[in-house]
Amino acid sequence: MAKVRLENINRVYNQAVAIADISFEIPDGEFWVLVGPSGCGKSTILRTIAGLESATSGNIYIGDRLVNNVPARQRDVAMVFQNYALYPHMTVAQNIGFGLKMRQVDSNIIKQRVLEVARSLSLEHLLERTPKQLSGGQQQRVALGRAIARQAEVFLLDEPLSNLDAQLRDDTRAELKQLHHNLRNTTVYVTHDQVEAMTLADKIVVLEKGRIQQIGDPQTIYSQPANRMVATFIGNPPMNILPAKFLGKQFDIWGQMIPVGDNMGKMADLNIPVGQVVELGIRPEYMTLAENGDEEGDKPLLLVEVKVVEPLGRETLIRAGIPGSMTILNIQTSANIRPQPGDRLHLLLDLQHLFVFDGETGKRLFPLV
Ligand SMILES: Nc1ncnc2c1ncn2[C@@H]1O[C@H](COP(=O)(O)OP(=O)(O)O)[C@@H](O)[C@H]1O
Ligand SMILES: [Mg+2]
């Protein structure tokens, strides 16, 4: 196994920047997830590590070896693609053993290794079938098995679950996690699905427009997003974003005044000019329906108008607008709460969990650390 290090990797296609200034080091044995919207450069990074693309500039190390000029097949990486590309005329066993056969490994060793891998993926009863006799999930496991059998230094997985239906995707995701727990191979996993990123990763690399937005463990990414993009991309339903004007002791949100409250002391250090337009961020779980009596005193209440009510069984999701604006909020409430579209509600904001983002750059201004 090996660590993987990228140093200032850039890739330009016809003068368009696909990835810019990508640097990180994955310690030996860790599972890292590259996540971001479609087109943000995830596959380009992965293919560059694999040696299927060359970087316009920058260095890539696998272990301590600089591999910039090492061809793909000598990099000792195993890659699994979204469309898993099994050999249709070969059996499952032959598919799993293919990489070993190419390396002229002894056929008895291949046989034994294929069996071991097939067992670890619950495929041993399918070894004589061909891919078209398998379900999508089984095919996906065979593709993984082919990578595992190779015992490569590094695993590269590009959206490996996106062709599976929802239930199977969840199951295979859990299997992958268990597999990594057992094998401990250095893995780079690409997905646009933030749930996969959160559930699988030791570290998440959030990308947008070819640039790294933040690198961190899942909990840090969730609770201390570096900017608005990370804040709204990770988490479902997403963090609510409210345009607001900073008035020193309160925020003006479309004419509604929200006190800065206990955050005052810490906020003073920020030197945000009074009158500055910012964006407030607050996750759905930190907005609750106000109760009788909340109106008294200086509590942070926000009046909203219900647009859509989505009962989900365990909870009810409410989409509501701030009157006089286009701003829509997601609110999670208990299942027994069923307001009607058009109802007006007061939300109580938990300001302990308030973020302030720069209105222009999206950078997190508050909290500072
Ligand atoms: N072979 C290519 N030729 C030209 N542009 C490309 C090529 N491959 C990728 N790109 C561009 O690079 C950017 C990143 O693409 P990609 O890495 O595939 O994104 P992702 O995997 O995150 O969806 C996109 O704008 C894409 O159009
Ligand atoms: Mg891609």
Image: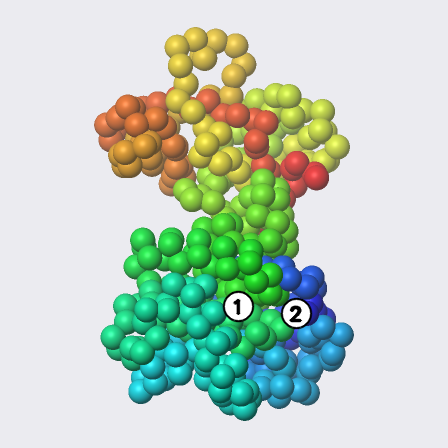
Q: Disc 1 on helix, strand or loop?
A: helix
Residue ID at (29%, 24%): 337
Residue 315 image point, x, y percent: 33, 31
Location of residue 249 (image quadrant): top right
Residue at screen point 32% across, 69% down:
125
Q: Which residue is mark 2?
A: 1
Residue under the image location 52 percent in, 17 percent down:
299
Residue 242 x %, y %: 48, 37
Label 2: which secondary element: loop
Mark whose residue sits in front, 2 or 1: 2
Q: Which mark is residue 264?
A: none
**Disc nearer the start of the sequence (2/1):** 2
Q: CA distance from mark 2 to mark 1?
A: 22 Å
Tell me, yes or no, if residue 326 can be seen here.
yes
Q: Read off the residue under disc 1.
A: 42
Identify the amino acid type marked 1: Lys
Q: Is mark 2 within 8 Å of ligand 2?
A: no
Q: Nearer the viewer, residue 179 or 205?
A: 179
In the rendered image, residue 164, in percent from the top left (x then y), is placed at: 33, 63
Image colouring: rainbow
- Rendered residue at 39%/33% (across/down): 331
Label 1 CB less than 8 angstroms from ligand 1? yes
Q: Looking at numbered disc 2 in the image, what kind of residue is underneath it?
A: Met
From this view, report whether residue 157 is shown above or below residue 365: below
| Neighbour tally class for label 1: few under 14, some 14-19, many 20 plus, Cα within 10 Å | many
Left or right? Give the position of 135 relative to 146. Answer: left
